[in-house]
Structures are given as C-alpha cells and as structure tokens.
Image (cartoon, rainbow, N blue to C red):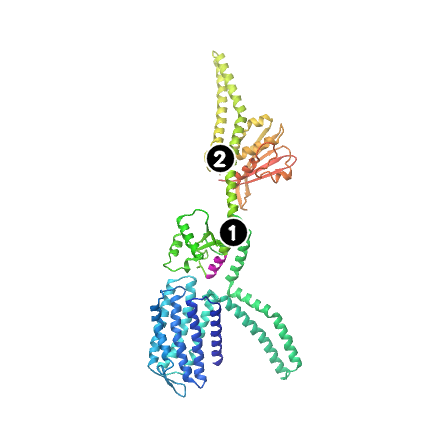
Amino acid sequence: MGIIYFLIVIAGILFSYLLLRYGEKNIPTLSFLITILASTMWSLSIFLHWSTDAPVFWGKATFLAAILIPVSLLFFSLTYPQKKIKFTWYNSLAIIIAPLLLLAITPTDFIIKSITVDRTIIYNLGHKIFIIYFFTYISGVVAFTLQGLRKYKGLSKAKLQYFFLGLLCAVFGASITNIILPILGTNEYNKIGPLFVIFFLSFTVYAIIKHQLLDISVIINRTAAYALTVLLFGSIYLSFVFAYVVYFTNNINAFFLGISLLYGLFAVQFFFYVRNTIQNTSEKIFFPSRSNYQKMLLKTAKELGECISLQELKHILESNLVREMNFSNPHLYLAYKKQKPDINHLMQELKQSKETKVRDFLEAKDELKAELSKLEAQACVPCFSKNELQGLLLLGTKTNQRAYSIQDFNFLETLSYQIGATLERAQPYEKLKSEYEKAMQVTEKMSEQAAYATLTRRVAHEINNPLAMILGQSILIKKYQNQPEKVAKNANAIYQSVERLSHILQIMLKYGSQKSRVSEFLNINEVLEEICSLARADLASKEIKVAKDLAADLPLIKGDSNRLHQVFLNIILNAVQAIHSKGAISIITRQADFTNKAGMRTQGIEIKVENNGPEIPATIQQQIFDTFFTTKKEGLGLGLSITLNIINEHDGMLSLTSDSHKTTFTVYLPRG
C-alpha cells in the first residue's frame, strides 16, 4: 500500500507542476490545480494518519484537503469549457463562504473529537455539516457537468465526458469508504479511499493526451518520454548489477566500476537519441493527428511562400484544406474589395479581436455564432499581415463529419498569418494583372475591329464581281427584251449573283456584329465554310487551292460563334500570308479525344488547318502564341495570341507543328 500512496503523491505533484508551469492561466486551470493538490494532500494525510504517531493531526489534515476538493471542482464545472454564470463578488462569496468556515473550524474538535488507540475516529457535529457541504457541492458539480454534456458537442463534450467519468469513479468510491462507512461506524476502510484518486488522474491524463484538456498534452508526452528513457537505462543498469552480484561477487572492484563508467558514458551518448525516439513513437501512436497537422502546416507554409497570385492561393487552400484536412466550402474574402454587408460586418468585428473563431467554441449567446450560422460557416479565420487585415477565410463543416478540434483551431490560427502574408504579396500582382486584362480587352476589341475592317476591304472585290455581273445581265435583258429565252437566262444569272451577294453580306453582318458573348451549340463545319467564303478573295489573289475534308458525323460544340469565327479566320489568313503563291491549304475535321489542360481526357473534335508554306523555325514556334510577338513588318502580333486565348476560354487546345513540307495548326474543342 505504501508504494501505491507514494505513486499517487508523486503523480499528483508532477501533474500539479505541469499545470502550474504549462497550463493556461485561467480559472479552470487554477481550480483544477487546487483539486489535484487537495486530492494529493488528502491521500498523503490518510497514509500518514495510519502510519505515524500523530493520527489526530493527520486526521484533521485529511478534512482540510477534503474541504477544498468540492469547491474547486464546482468552480471548474462553472467555468469549463465556458463560463456558465457571471461571477460577481456576492455570488463568489456565496460559493466560498461554506468551505472557508469549515476550514476555520477543522483544526478544532468540531469535526474530529478524538481518535482511539486503534485509529478509530470519534466524530463531532461538524462531521455532519461537512457531509452536507460535500454532497451539496458535488451534486452541483454533477449537475453543471451534465448540463455541459447536453449543451456542448464535439471536442468540448469529449473532454467533459472523460472528466465526468473520472469524477464519478473517484467520488463514488471515496464517498463509500471515507464518508458512508465511517457514518456506519467503520473507519478501517478509509485507507482505500485514495486509490480512487488513481481513476480520476487516469481519466484526466487520458483526456489531456487524447483531447488536449487544458492544453498540456505535449508537455506530458515529453515528460513521459524522459521518464521512460530514464527507466529504460536504469533497468538495464540494475539488470547488470543484479547479474554481477548473483553470478560473480558482491564486492565492488575495479572491473565493476569500469563497466559502470563505460555504461554511464554510453547512456550519456545515447540518452537524447532514445528519448527522441520514444517521444516521436508515442506521438505517432497517441497523437497521429498532431503529426499530420505539423506536416500539413509545413507543406502549406512552403507552398504559400512561393505563391504570388490569388488563383494559386485558392488552389493551395482547395488542395490542402479540403482534400487533405477535410475542411469544406472554403471562401476567401479580400479586405481591399467591396463585400456583402454580412461579410463587411464580420471583417470589422474580427479586425478588432484578431482571433480565429470556431462556432463550436463560441457561447450560445455570442452574436458572432449567429452570424456564422447565417453564413453556413463553422470557422472564420482572419488573415493579418503587418497588423493589417488582408482577408477573411470562411470554412464549412468537416467532410469526415467530425467536430472542429483544438488542433484544428491551432492549425488555422497559425496558418492565418501565412495566408495574410500571401494576400499582401498578391495584391500588387493582382492589380497589375487586372490592369493588363483591361488593356488586353481594349486591345483585343481594337484588333477585332481592325480585322473586320481589313476583311471588309478584302471582300470588296468579291462583292464587285456579282455586282458587275448583275449590271451586265441587266443591260442584256434590256437589249434582248423581245427574246424570252435569253431574258430568262440573264435573269437566272442575276438571281445567282444576288444569292451570292446575300450570302456574303449575311456572313459579314454575323461576324461584324458587336453583340455580347453568347454560348450556343454550333456545327464547326458550317463555321469553316463561312470563313472560306470570307477569305475567297485572299485565296484567289495568290491562286491558293483549298481542300476540305469535313467529317459529316461531327457532334455539335458549345461556344461563341463570333469568337470562333475569329479563331479560324486568323488561322486561315495566317496560312494565306505564309504562302507566297500557288500554294495549298487543307482543312480537315474529325471526331477525336484529347487531354485538356487540367489533365482530363475529353471527348471532342479535331480541326486541322495545313498549308505548304515555308517551315516555321523552332525558335519562333516557341514564341508564336506570345502577345505582341510578330515577324511581320506590320501588325501588333495579337492574332495568334487572341486565338489561343479564345481556344482556352472554350476549354480547348491549340498546337502547332511545322517542317519543310507543311505547317499544321491543330485545334481541339470539347463536344457540347
């Protein structure tokens, strides 16, 4: 029994030191510390009551310790995990006045009248008052803890469950041996009471290790690693001493001292290696999630350190927070942009507190909890850099259906500063990108208008031919008005010329319309036929033959007709410009699967535009789609750059191959 008492006292002292040294400085920690110290003092006093010549002194000391346990537990249950009442001087006094009065009268004979030779305690009236006080306060502790178990969920509930189980075991067992049985006249079992403290300490330590109760689990793990390492090296040395004494001699000689010295040097050399191994192993066994959080924090911090754009940042958050850490629905709101009123109000509140907020950790009456519920968010992470709010990250429930833990809270709190620094760094880049995109939109519009104007001039010849035909046939009709057969023939020629004009004008109006971008189902073969009609004058001027191999079974695609007209007009005119004269252009369409930029295999169509012009050098091929790159004396170098942008907008692919025989532009577009 002495060894058990000794272990209880050592565990209580160590646990109290850890709480005092590393626990949070608040009422729950202080009240829990008093509970542990009082329980330790109570256990030690009972042991000394039975084993020393001062049973009366130590008997009264047991009551001094026992009086502190209910009141400290009551304060803990009233404040953990959140305050359940508002503490004022009068309600605080109401709680502590009873234990203060009992503490004052304990040294007198009011509780213990005397103790017989066989250590039987003769109780006085104060003992009944103590019993009433004890069970009243413990009932309050149980009631408030049960209230917390009903009210809270997730991490807070798990912590309270282990605290409650340990409390029930300790109170139930100790009440029987040290209160109920003594009332019935039997004191000999009160020495068993402290054994139930072991249950309380065990459940508490487990709650700390498993759920970070009072957040000193890391220290306990480190301390345990030291203790196990010392025990391991000590056991090895004691085994050597035992074997030496049993099988060799009891005399301490030079050989024994030499081996002991060598072992001491060995222990010093490898102590920290063994301790780190034990600590890392225990972390993997008891704290697997902590290890994951640390790895993910390092990985995310590294990726954010190299991130300069919002698009990259969102990709990192999507990958690491959603796929790896099971957070859902991340929404990043920027402080320098105008947001909805709810988000602006949230930003103003968190700008003051500068703390990550998790719904499960907020009190029911907290206005912030209601706001997060309205936004369907479980966590709100303000992202600061240089004391300035850069943005706000909202997260939904966890995809694995688990509640947010203190580890989630700490992870997000640490990550918030990395996100804040990234947002600050990305602002100049995003501003420059925005200005560039605006400039490109203006330039692209100018390029479209210039292309249309150029095209209009080029088709003028195509329009003049049918106009000349109409004029000539009209003169002939007038000349041969008395010859019906010739008039009919001339009228038919006029009709065909008018149809040709109408077709050209319809294409021009369609291509030149300045309507907003509209996505519709298109037959790509029809688009290519229209482009060939528009480019007929350019093709004829260089005597270029066009061979078309257009598959009849092509699926429809979904896209913007005007912009796809621009794509293929740019590619065909580019081919015309590359051919000196009397060349050939082939246009081929077919069904084809392709791998898009996201790496996904996609069903779609393939359009190849081949020409037999000169080879494009490899150095130019690498730059040909760059904005403002051109090998021509005239032009801005926007045609192929805009073409690539339009294809990207349609989730397609554009590639170029060129050799001494032909140059091929290949376009892939997904089916609609």
Count of numbered circles in the view: 2
Relative to 281, say whether 634 is above or below: above
**Residue at screen point 51% across, 38% down:** 439
* 494, 273: nearer the viewer: 273
Between 57 and 520, the one lying in front of the other is: 57
Residue 92, quarter of the rendered image:
bottom left
As rendered, which of 1 and 27 lies closer to the eye? 27
Secondary structure beneath dot 1 equals: helix
| Magenta stretch, overall SS | helix
What label does residue 561 carry, if any?
2
Q: Position of residue 167 (x, y in %)?
A: 41, 71
Image height check: is 459 above or below 669?
A: above
Residue 422, label in figure: 1
Magenta highlight range: 406-414
Q: Amino acid at mark 1?
A: Thr
Residue at 42 percent across and 63 percent down: it is 156
